[in-house]
Each structure stands twice: as C-alpha cells, then as structure tokens.
C-alpha cells in the first residue's frame, strides 16, 4: 500500500529558530502534496498545496514567507517553519496523492512542533 | 459551498454497540466521500470511502450510508470495540481538487 513517511515525529525548538519537516512518499510518486496544521481537538486546516517542481499554493491567511514549502522531487516535500514563535506550536501533517489516481490521499504520521 | 458539517462532536458507546456519525455537505459537485480515523499523535488513516453513485458501502464492521438527495452521509460502526476509540473525520472532495474535512467526532467505546 501507499506509504508516506514524515519526519521528525516531534521537535522542540527555541523561538526565532527554523525547523524543517520532511514528507516522503516511499512507494509511489506524489505529484501533489498537501500540508495541514491541526490544533488539539480540531479538524485539519489546509495550509498549502505543493506540486512537484512548482511553487506552492498557500491558503488564505497562511504566511508564505514563514512556512516555506519545497517540492523538489516526486517523492519529497519539505515544510520549513522560519523564525518560529510559540504560537507556531502545533501538529503538522502532510498528505500525498498517487500519480494518476484522483482519489488516493495518503497521510503522514504528523509532526508535533513545540516552540519554547 | 465547500463546507462539510459533522455531528456529533463527541460520542460515547458501550462495547458491542453501534456508533453512528453523520455528515452533511453543500457542494453537489463533490464526487468522493472518505472517512478517516485518527489516533492521538498520529496522522489520519483512510477507513472507508464512497462515491455518490452508490447508496451504501460496507467493509467489515464499517458501513457508509449515502443519501444524495439529502446531501448527507454517515458512518456506522457495528459491534464497536474499545480499539475503535479515536477521532473520526468525514471529508468530501471534487476529483482533482483538495479534501474538505468535517469538524471531527471523538469516539469513546467503553469496555
């Protein structure tokens, strides 16, 4: 089955530093990857959509300069939280679609970011 | 147009009972309706999904009922088990587009 690996599973960083989260599709080519943010007891909030080789499309209200997304290959997308602040602390989840499949969305296991 | 409304917010069921979670959507162009199961600290995992050309789909203890005219769909978990305790999200999608999630239902199955 389709597997999406997300790393790290948790990270603690100091305010003002940057953190990179990786999302890899292990056994399929992902033309599109999605990045979500989830607060406790809430639903997933789409942050941005990234297509391989092109710039990410950010949702309204999401700062593109703060949340840098790179999708350089069909198997890897990264989310970098720049100049992190405590309010950026959250659960970040990536999702990837299967090449040639309209309905295959596989989620990563998520990254718990805590900014202190 | 893009919203998916989910209820209840939380649900407590006894072991062996039936868990029912409901969702309603607005956009009649949606053509794929998945349900996801999420355990604490983990990403969502696809549980079961349905397309609007069928009214029901069953996989093991999980059944989706779909009412196209009412723009509603529901998840039924038969013989609920403590291991089913998780957060469940319904979602809807227009093919080639992104998923629109419901608000989530926290299910607790008591032993």
Image (cartoon, grey):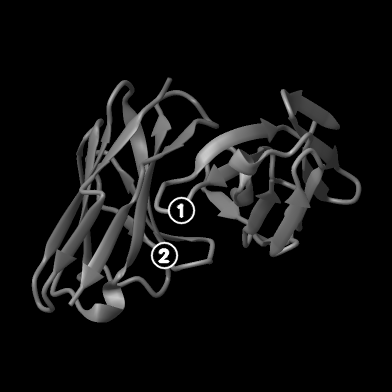
Residue A82 seen by the camera: yes
- Residue shown at 75% from the left, 61% from the top: B7
Estimate the x, y position of residue A33 in percent, counting from the top left: 35, 43
- Residue shown at 75% from the left, 62% from the top: B8
Where is mark 2, residue-wise? A59
Residue located farthest toward the right when viewing the structure as drawn: B69
Q: Nearer the viewer, residue B63 or B111?
A: B111
- Residue shown at 28% from the left, 73% from the top: A88
Q: Is residue A104 left or right of residue A96?
A: right
Which numbered tag is attached to residue A57?
Answer: none
Q: Is residue B16 left or right of residue B67?
A: left
- At mark 1, the secondary structure is loop
What is the C-alpha distance between the residues marked 1 and 2?
25 Å
Estimate the x, y position of residue B69 in percent, counting from the top left: 91, 46
- Few, some or many C-alpha atoms within 10 Å of disc 1 (few <14, some 14-19, many ≥20)? few
Residue B94 seen by the camera: no
Residue located farthest toward the front when viewing the structure as drawn: B111
Q: Nearer the viewer, residue B23 or B17?
A: B17
Place residue A66 in its image quadrant.
Answer: bottom left
Estimate the x, y position of residue A82 in percent, counting from the top left: 15, 69
Determine the chain carrying the residue at label 2: A
Same chain shared by disc 1 and disc 2: no
Place residue A47 in its image quadrant.
Answer: bottom left
Determine the chain carrying the residue at label 1: B
Which one is closest to the eye, mark 1 or mark 2? Answer: 1
Which numbered tag is attached to residue B40?
Answer: 1
Estimate the x, y position of residue B31 in percent, counting from the top left: 69, 38
* Number of marks drawn: 2
Quadrant occupied by the N terminus of chain B: bottom right
Q: Is residue B79 above or below residue A64?
A: above
- At mark 2, the secondary structure is loop
């Amino acid at each position: 089955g389709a597997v999406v690996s997300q790393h790290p599973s948790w990270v603690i960083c100091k305010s003002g530093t940057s953190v990179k989260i990786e999302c890899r599709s292990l056994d399929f080519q992902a033309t599109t990857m999605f990045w979500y943010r989830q607060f406790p007891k809430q639903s997933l909030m789409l942050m941005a959509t990234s297509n391989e080789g092109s710039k990410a499309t950010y949702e309204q209200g999401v700062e593109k300069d703060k949340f840098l997304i790179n999708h350089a290959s069909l198997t890897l997308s990264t989310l970098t939280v720049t100049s992190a602040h405590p309010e950026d602390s959250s659960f970040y989840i990536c999702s990837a679609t299967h090449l040639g499949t309209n309905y295959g969305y596989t989620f990563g296991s998520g990254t718990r970011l805590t900014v202190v | 147009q893009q919203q998916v409304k989910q209820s209840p917010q939380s649900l407590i069921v006894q072991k062996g009972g039936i868990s029912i979670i409901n969702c309603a959507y607005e956009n009649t162009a949606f053509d794929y309706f998945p349900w996801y199961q999420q355990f604490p600290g983990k990403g969502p995992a696809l549980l079961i999904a349905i397309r609007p050309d069928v009214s029901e789909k069953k996989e093991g203890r999980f059944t989706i009922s779909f009412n196209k005219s009412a723009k509603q769909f529901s998840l039924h978990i038969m013989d609920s088990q403590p291991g089913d305790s998780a957060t469940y999200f319904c979602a809807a999608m227009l093919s080639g587009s992104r998923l629109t999630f419901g608000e989530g239902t926290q299910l607790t199955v008591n032993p």
